[in-house]
Image: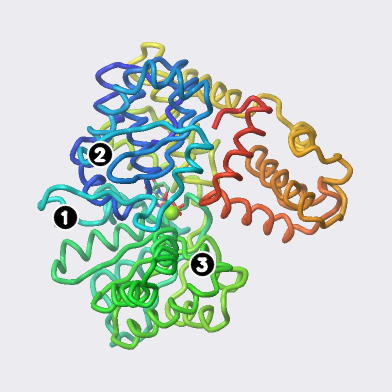
Amino acid sequence: MTSLLFPCSKRKFRQNFILTIEAISALCYNVNMIDINDVWNDTLSQLAAHVSANNYSLWLERLSPYVVKDNVLYLTAVDRVKKQTEKVYLPQIKTALNKVCPSFSDVKILLPEEADALGAGDDFFSGELVIKTEKKEEKSAFLPKYTFDTLVVGESNQMAYHAARAVSENPGSNDRFINFNPLFVYGGVGLGKTHLLHSVGNYIHKNYPSLKIVYHTSEQLINSFYNALQASNKTKSMNDFRSFYHNIDVLIIDDIQFLAGKKELQNVFFHIFNELYQLGKQIILSSDRHPKEIETLEDRLISRFSGGLMADIGQPGLEMRVAILKKKMQFEKIAVNNDVVYYIAERIDSNVRELEGALLKVILYAQLIGKPYPDLDTAKEALKIADNGKNEDIDSTKIIDAVSDYYRIGKNELLSKKKTKEISDARMIAIYLVHELLSLPLVTIGQLFGGRDHTTIIHARDKISQKLKDDERTKREIQDIKSMLSISG
Ligand code: ADP
Ligand code: MG
């Protein structure tokens, strides 16, 4: 439920689409474990019900979560958006945020340069929040909506599912004929890896409450590692970092591919892994690719990661996509006709997150135009508007021109083989944007950029995706170029 394209204020919409307060509170209890983007996305979902579609996309959608410090959520925005939002929406934002999570004491909006000045000190993680009540700390780290019950099993994920079930029923057991330790689940974005990992976590938490489970996104792992490295008493903080993993029974790390290039962390993680493994503790990892394809992952880690059960998750077929939509409708208590369900499932075939997003857009659009349930025409109209809204006649030439203008680097140089830092950084941004905005095949993008190999394209795309996680400057530059192309966000 990230971007609500057609927010509306009807009651039914709210009942169906805004996360229930319980679910939201569960999210809040575990903010330590959750990216602040999740908290912000849920806050936006709350706000969407109270703000017109226009104002929502003009102002609120242009705010970006930056950091949590002393229980204050800091957002960033360009000057115009900051002024208008502070003038009109700040109280509403605070109310919505506190509905999502009462532990926040305030929200502040910073200009990018103010955010840089605020920095990210060593005493907090970007998503950390001090939770106030006792009860909350006892809650599970896992999203209640991600369980085996809400997961549709089909050809594309059955191996991963069965392995995950086996591990959940008997975590860390070394008596099996097949070794399930570690369980390494890999597959493309939006195909259900996180859902599966949370399902394992929820299952173990419920059925083996005495087991200590740690779930980290690799971003959290990376943040806490670098915070420990930068602390004033490094020896103590590194010992604390390692000993945090000593007494746990199940370790789950999501999106381990981000360990690529982090040599020191890989080294420390290798020892944590070995220690847990030797004690028969269950380790579960996910990645968007096979360990061998994770660039700069040490050989000894590749071999450890591949030493248990490797299970890939592929793209779901049509019937499975239909089943996923139906499951989603059942969970959200929404009814949509079969022909509409098939229409959506046929159109979106590569990513379950997008599939769910399309269903949401169709239903919101029907609400907006006053139809209790969407019919086929409404669905077609809704998805057409969504498509148009997305990339109004943008093509690769426009993207390359915009990047060339922005960095004041000639177009020919961008497409050339020149490797000076300035040119190759700008080229990687251009490649990233062409990939993100046009979803062209990698080989085609390679051809557009002077006949480059598709692996070069993957490298550029991944490098920028990685930078976008922690480099404010890259984030800002990409946002600026997108605004030049008249795309928000
Ligand atoms: P990933 O971690 O692989 O990027 P997620 O686990 O975040 O993907 O899945 C994206 C969305 O798609 C989530 O809302 C998830 O619940 C849903 N989803 C993915 N696969 C399935 C499935 N097999 N059954 C039900 N929902 C699914
Ligand atoms: Mg994920």
Ligand 2, seen in the image, is in the quarter at bottom left
Is residue 159 in sight in this rendering?
A: no
Residue 34 higher or lower than 298, as above or below: above
Q: Which of these two is toward me, 344 or 211?
A: 211
- Calculate the distance from the C-alpha at mark 1 to the C-alpha at mark 3: 28 Å
Quarter of image, res 448: top right
First along the sequence among labels 1 and 3: 1
User: Which of pointers 1 and 2 indicates the residue nearer the eye?
Assistant: 2
Q: Which mark is residue 216?
A: none
Q: Which mark is residue 104?
A: 2
Q: Residue furthest front?
A: 232
Percent x, y for residue 163?
36, 70
Amino acid under disc 2? Phe
Q: Which of these two is toward me, 246 or 187?
A: 246
In what element is the residue under mark 3? helix
Q: Is residue 419 left or right of residue 467?
A: right
Q: Is residue 180 left or right of residue 399?
A: left
Amino acid under disc 3? Leu
The residue at the point 25 percent across, 68 percent down is 213
Percent x, y for residue 300?
53, 84
The residue at the point 53 percent across, 37 percent down is 113
Do tag 2 and tag 3 residues touch (Cβ < 8 Å)?
no
The residue at the point 13 percent across, 70 percent down is 210
Q: Which of these two is toward me, 34 or 197?
A: 34
The residue at the point 32 percent across, 21 percent down is 49
Q: Where does the N terminus fall, quadrant-wise?
A: top left
In what element is the residue under mark 2? loop
- Calculate the distance from the C-alpha at mark 2 to the C-alpha at mark 3: 30 Å
